[in-house]
Amino acid sequence: MLWFSRTLTLSTLAVSVFATAAVAGPRVDANGVVIRDEASCGTRQVASAQAAPMSFAATPTKTIYLNKNGGTYNIVNGATDSATNSAGTIAAGDGRTHMGAVIPPIDASFDWPYIVACVRLHYKPYAVTITETEPTAGNYVEAVVGGTGASTGWSASSGILGVASADNFCGVTERGIAFSFATNHVGISKANDELCATIAHEVGHLLALEHEATGTDTMSYVPFASSGSKLFTTANGRCGTTPTQTGACSCQQVAAGMTNSAMRLGQFVGLRPTEKEPPKLELKSPGNGDKVPPTFVVTAVASDNDVMEQVAVLIDNVAVASSTSPAGTTYTINVTNAALGDHMLTVNAIDLAGNVTTKSIALKIAKSELGETCTGNEQCAGSLCATAESGNFCSQVCDDTNKCPDGFDCTSVGATSICVESTGCSATGRNGGYSLIVLVGLALTGVRRRRRVKTA
């Protein structure tokens, strides 16, 4: 396997790549240690135009978006922009544009929650917010995780593990994109840890970090299985890729031939605050004792004297959803496919310093009954959410054998009959009957009904 950096001095774009010798797996020696052969995989790290010493003040909190769902990216000549999925051609293995390069979602074999927690650990000391929901405004760094490098022009046999598209190798690329090719991690020893290290490494390049030779440093080429741990180390380390492959520093040096990933993150990103005041939190919905369907929305208002990090939702002390992107101070968190039954819902407001404010309520999670409001089929006991002029309501298919309960009529809608709340006369006797207008489960016009329960 090989990490290497290439600086294009004409465009000031930089690339960092972590590659295996072949898709089938990394080359190893007789003792099973990964062989990294720099000569087989590109150019050496070289000094860039940003090599002169610079002094930077701490910048506002950076947001890192972890994207396991893939997407379509335009690899073009120009600046990288995570908001528009545009990456510089440095991300392409053949150096050409690739319009509509498709990155598939992460392989199901990986433990995504473990990887997210691992990346969070790498960046825990620093002023960053890590989210799995793409921000709708502001600058953010995107780490897209999935597939192989083939979709962006790298050879299918290269085994490339990651590439960072940075506009300034020695500074922060505010809207940079880091590609971590999950499929090429399959079969590598401690694959979840190695993929975590790739993600943290490639994001590090977007946050002004260069390679560091210390084996346990995130910016080293030494694999996790050999180093035993990976973090941004606090001691000065030689510039280079491994302890035996050192070289000249490309960026500002802390001493002759030395860099320090932890120090540079503190300089360019800033340290996480240490204040002790907890956030303010108000849980708007649902309310204590409410009944909600398996898929529902939690709405909370949260703020902090310094900087908020996230609002997290737990059911019976198990994390199920979170948000780092409020509208003002209002957080809207979607909970999906929650287990039926009586539960304890906990909402945590967490600030960047790690202070937590908690609100807990009792909640009954149950599918909605006939006539109750709904937004999807999965919310209804009858597995059918129908739409009428007055809104959505739960229904069920009916026939001569499966009759509707009292208060509901079996009404034909096209080729299907469903239960519709009775209106005092035969629904089927109305002039023109009902028509299919919008597909939720089925959709009806002309139906009047009462709203017995309002759900979030």
Image (spheres, grey):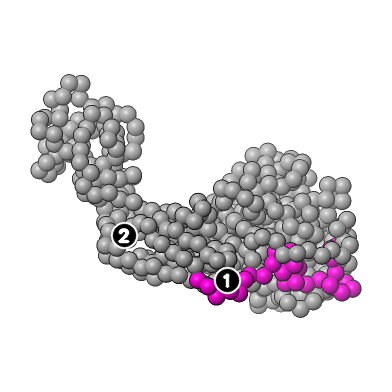
The magenta-colored residue range is: 250-278
Q: Which mark is residue 194?
A: none
Residue drawn 13% across the image and 36% down it: 422
Q: Is residue 382 visible?
A: no
Where is 350 relative to 69, above or below?
below
**Left or right of 231 in this view: 248:** right
Mark 2 falls on what kind of element? loop
Q: Which residue is mark 1?
A: 353
Disc 1 residue type (three-letter)? Ala
Could you say which is closer to the camera, residue 191 or residue 361? 361
Disc 2 residue type (three-letter)? Gly
Could you say which is closer to the camera, residue 393 or residue 68? 393
Where is 405 relative to 146, above or below?
above
In which image quadrant can residue 286 be found?
A: bottom left
**Left or right of 345 in this view: 104:** right
Q: Is residue 45 visible?
A: yes
Q: Which residue is mark 2?
A: 287
Q: Callout 2 environment at 10 Å: few (<14), some (14 to 19), or many (20+)?
A: some
Quadrant in which the N terminus is drawn: bottom right
**N-term mark: 1 or 2:** 2
Asked whether 118 falls inside the magenta stretch, the response is no
Mark 1 falls on what kind of element? loop
Residue 53 location (% of width, % of height): 87, 65
**Left or right of 322 in this view: 27:** right
SS assignment for the magenta stretch, majority: loop
- The CA span between labels 1 and 2 is 28 Å
Residue drawn 62% across the image and 71% down it: 273
Asked whether 271 falls inside the magenta stretch, the response is yes
In which image quadrant can residue 25 be found?
A: bottom right
- Outermost residue toward the top in this view: 431
Residue drawn 44% across the image and 64% down it: 281
- How many labels, in total? 2
